[in-house]
Amino acid sequence: MGDNDREDAQIRPALVLAPGEGRPVSLGAAGEVILKAVSSDTGGTLAVYEFTVPPATAGPPLHIHRNWDEAFYVLEGEMAFLIDGQTSTAPAGAFVFIPRGVPHTFWNKSAAPARQLTVFTPAGIEDYFDDVTQVMTAGGEDTLETATALMEKHDMVVPASSRAAYGALTSPQNPPR
């Protein structure tokens, strides 16, 4: 990249966060998301968050992103993923990439907390988390209907056969749908 190219490009400041820094988003009993980089930080190119999932806890219902690619890197613990009908176990150090259009969900089936770093491209998932926070703060019920409406508002599709979003697993060893 030459000097002229750099002058023409939009220059954004670098972002350096210490461990634990970022904007926290509570999902109640389902854990905590810490937004690390969002659209305003990256010019809309990507969003990054860290998600701590309590033991035996479901993630979102089975869903499809119409316009987002999603990548996960398991930092601690062990996560399970259901991707296009196939279940995979992802221990610490595992990497999972899910292209847009592929049905998926994830959960922590273990007896210990799990933590993962998630990258979305392009950015925008932070708007979904802001809406989830508003529903939870307003005392809204965590039902499949509520989750589906929020997800559809943010360009995701939730198949009719899905289960409720985020919460304790009734049987931690069986995949949620």
Image: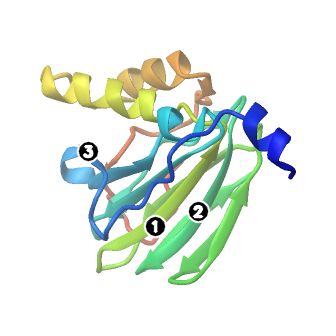
Q: In which quadrant of the rendered view does residue 173 lie?
A: bottom left
Q: Judge from the rendering whether residue 91 lies leftward or rightward of residue 85; answer left or right.
A: left
Question: Can you say whether 175 is above or below 114 in the image?
Answer: above
Rendering coords of residue 119 (x, y %): 58, 53
Where does label 2 land, which residue?
A: 72
Q: Residue furthest front?
A: 3
Q: Label 1 amino acid?
A: Gln
Coloring scheme used: rainbow
Question: Can you say whether 151 is above or below 113 in the image?
Answer: above
Residue at mark 2 to residue at mark 3: CA–CA distance: 18 Å
Question: Can you say whether 166 is above or below 10 in the image?
Answer: below
Q: Residues within 10 Å of mark 2 (few under 14, many from 20)?
A: many
Looking at the image, tell me whether mark 1 or mark 3 is earlier in sequence order. Answer: 3
Res. 85 visible in picture: no
Question: Can you say whether 104 is above or below 133 in the image?
Answer: below
Looking at the image, tell me whether mark 2 or mark 3 is earlier in sequence order. Answer: 3
Where does label 3 land, which residue?
A: 27
Q: Nearer the viewer, residue 18 or 146?
A: 18
Identify the residue shown where x is 62% and y is 30%. Answer: 159
Q: Residues within 10 Å of mark 1 (few under 14, many from 20)?
A: many
CB under 8 Å between discs 1 and 2: yes
Identify the residue shown where x is 61% and y is 79%. Answer: 94
Where does label 1 land, which residue?
A: 116
Q: Nearer the viewer, mark 1 or mark 3?
A: 1
Q: Nearer the viewer, residue 115 or 173?
A: 115
Looking at the image, tell me whether mark 1 or mark 2 is earlier in sequence order. Answer: 2
